[in-house]
Image (tube, rainbow, N blue to C red):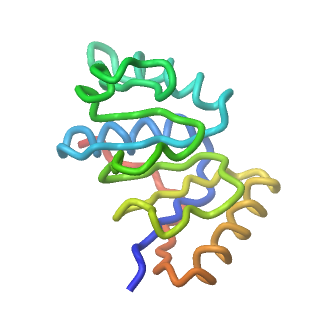
Amino acid sequence: MAAGVEFHTGVPDTLAFACRLVRKAYRRGFTVLCLAPRADLDKLDRALWTFVEREFIPHARLGVATAAMLERSPIWLATEMPGEGTSRDVVVRLGAETALGQAASARTIEVVGQDADEVDRGRDLWRQYKAAGFEVVHHPFAALRED
């Protein structure tokens, strides 16, 4: 069976939601790759520094950070999938137009906002994943409880 994909839909603030997901995964000891368009990645990078007062969520940007920094960082931010041999436990995706292929992480999370374009994008991704044989799980937006 193919890997699973989780869709979190109807998210009012996708960046804050992504910060919560990343923080939760980090606290549980998982490595994370966040994929987003460059403008959203810039915002996410800043948000991870300030998301929770007095709590830094360690992260590094692919293409900017040194290899040594990436090796020490549990969270990577990127605009596209890194090359072979760079797997992460969780992939969080914001604003992607195409589904992740079979090389996907064991856990892929698609974050879909509320506006009409986001909803259409999410539906297209859902169909792509289903057609590729992925098990898809839907999580309509609900406020996450703090861990």
Residue for point 65% across, 30% down:
38
Q: Residue at x 68, y 60 (%)?
A: 98
Quarter occupied by the C terminus: top left
The residue lying at 39 percent from left, 49 percent from top is 144
- The tally of labels here is 0
Percent position (x, y) of residue 94?
A: 59, 46
Name the residue nearer the viewer: 42 or 47: 42
Identity of the residue furthest to the front in this view = 84
Q: Nearer the viewer, residue 115 or 60?
A: 60
Side of 97 relative to 68 (left or right): right
Query: On the picture, is 115 further left or further right than 76?
Result: right
Instruction: Determine the residue located farthest toward the top in the rendered image.
Output: 54
* Residue under the point 35% across and 43% down: 32
Q: Nearer the viewer, residue 136 or 146?
A: 136
Q: Eyeballing the image, is 105 above or below 68? A: below
Is 98 left, or right, of 31 in this rendering? Answer: right
In the image, 37 versus 85, the foreground residue is 85
Residue 83 at what x, y percent from top left? 46, 46
- Residue 25 horizontal/vertical position (percent): 28, 45
Quadrant hosting residue 108: bottom left
Question: Left or right: where does residue 27 sit relative to residue 18?
Answer: left
Residue 75 occupies quadrant: top left
Task: State which quarter of the image contains the N terminus.
Answer: bottom left
Is the residue 101 above or below the residue 68 in the image? below
Check the image and report above or below for 137 versus 17.
below
Q: Position of residue 113 (x, y in %)?
A: 66, 50
